[in-house]
Image: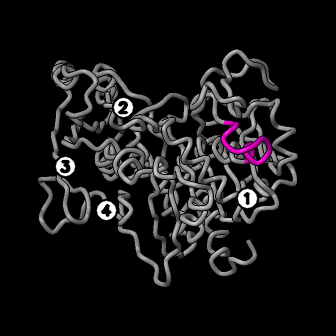
Amino acid sequence: MTLTLVLDDTDLPARFGAAAGALAAAEGTAFHHLPARFDTARDADAAQYVYAAGGLGPSGLVWAERALGRPVQAASSPAGIVAAAAAGPVTVPLHPAFLADGEAVAALERAAADAGVAVRRVTVVETAEGLALADAPGAAPPLLWRDRFGGLHTSARAEPGGPALAIALIGAERDHRDVYPAAVASLADAAEHLGIALDVHFVPPPGLDGAPEAIAARLRGFAGVLLPGGSDMANVPGQIRAAAATLAHGVPTVGLCLGMQTMSTAVAWRAFGAAVASLAEADPAAPIKTFVAMAGTSGGDGPLPEHRTGDQPVAPVAGSRLAAVLPRAPVIRCNHRFHLAPALVPELERAGLRVAATGCGGGIVDAVEVPDHPFFMGMQGHPELGTRRGAPHPLLVAFLTAAARHVRNPAAA
């Protein structure tokens, strides 16, 4: 059997495993990867891919999952990879910049030699169109095509005509192109599905620190606003201010994980006063803490997990707008240690919030919405990790549909 090592000498976390996953899909091999290490001081969200069975891995594995058409498993040891290769062909990404163990590759090759497994090495090169293999013919198409959002796909995206829908993503461009690409990819998938031309404008949260009127004016010209997930708590104040502005001015808004938390906190500002409330994780000194640790607390099914990860069932609330959007018995990838403080829910509901879905037997608020807003909806999980070309997540499709409607008739907002 054969072990194919795919060398990609990149320092972009968003590319981790992408080319190897595409090659594994093209050749019909198994896909494994070694443990990785990232500079999280530079790239806070470099390891935010959520394994379906639970746990976190390199963010670029989202491209491998999309190419393979199945979730990627957690990292394997050299011995485990060689054992798999002895049973059938295996493809492994090699990223020297991200190796957690500098001796892992040598150990992998020694174990392969001892087991009689042939080793093939290929090298990834970056072209104007995407990622290709160095030994491929010059006329061969890329292994992965790059779209204008930085996405990597096994076939090129067609650009629809017509005016583009301008969406503000409240995040730094580099973070979402080069570190955690799933949020932008999910928007592009939904736009392609709807046949909508899309323009994504990145708005770094630290820059949203002016007067509420100035922030509202900056965001009002967009068709919609996406509040992404992430682990960098420095983004929280700007996200909350953005959500408060779109809440007040009727701009369609969708929140993904951390984004749901900040949009819920914007409703808390409406209930308790601006800047009184914040996430306990972001501001432990906040007088009102909207999202609190799950550890040590109980929910509908008993004690809540300290860290909820992996594919989790979601229970939409009957009569909610979200219930009409999601499929029956929905499942979503989760990655969170904090949840909406149950004691605050009645006050938030009086301020206009509606619990749209729950999890853990009702012990966790899994989605929220504001019914009297054109579109103000978020999920605690990661819809962006449950989307791919041809099968976008219905929440993102509903968001872009509302954004397009907002452009056609902004006075209705």
Q: How many angstroms separate mark 3 from mark 2 (CA)?
A: 24 Å
The residue carrying pointer 2 sits among few (fewer than 14), some (14 to 19) or many (20 or more) residues within 10 Å by Cα, namely few
- Tell me the residue that label 4 is attached to: 145
Image mark for residue 90: none
In this rendering, position of residue 371 left or right of residue 269:
right
In this rendering, position of residue 411 left or right of residue 129:
right
N-terminal of the two: label 1 or label 2?
A: 2
Q: Is mark 1 on a helix, strand or loop?
A: helix
Rendering coords of residue 352 (x, y %): 83, 51
Q: What element carries label 3?
A: strand
Q: Which residue is drawn at 59% across and 32% down?
A: 336
N-terminal of the two: label 1 or label 4?
A: 4
N-terminal of the two: label 3 or label 1?
A: 3
- Tell me the residue that label 1 is attached to: 325
Q: How many angstroms separate mark 4 from mark 2 (CA)?
A: 27 Å
Quadrant of residue 90 within the rendered picture:
top left
Image mark for residue 40: 2
- Tell me the residue that label 3 is attached to: 124
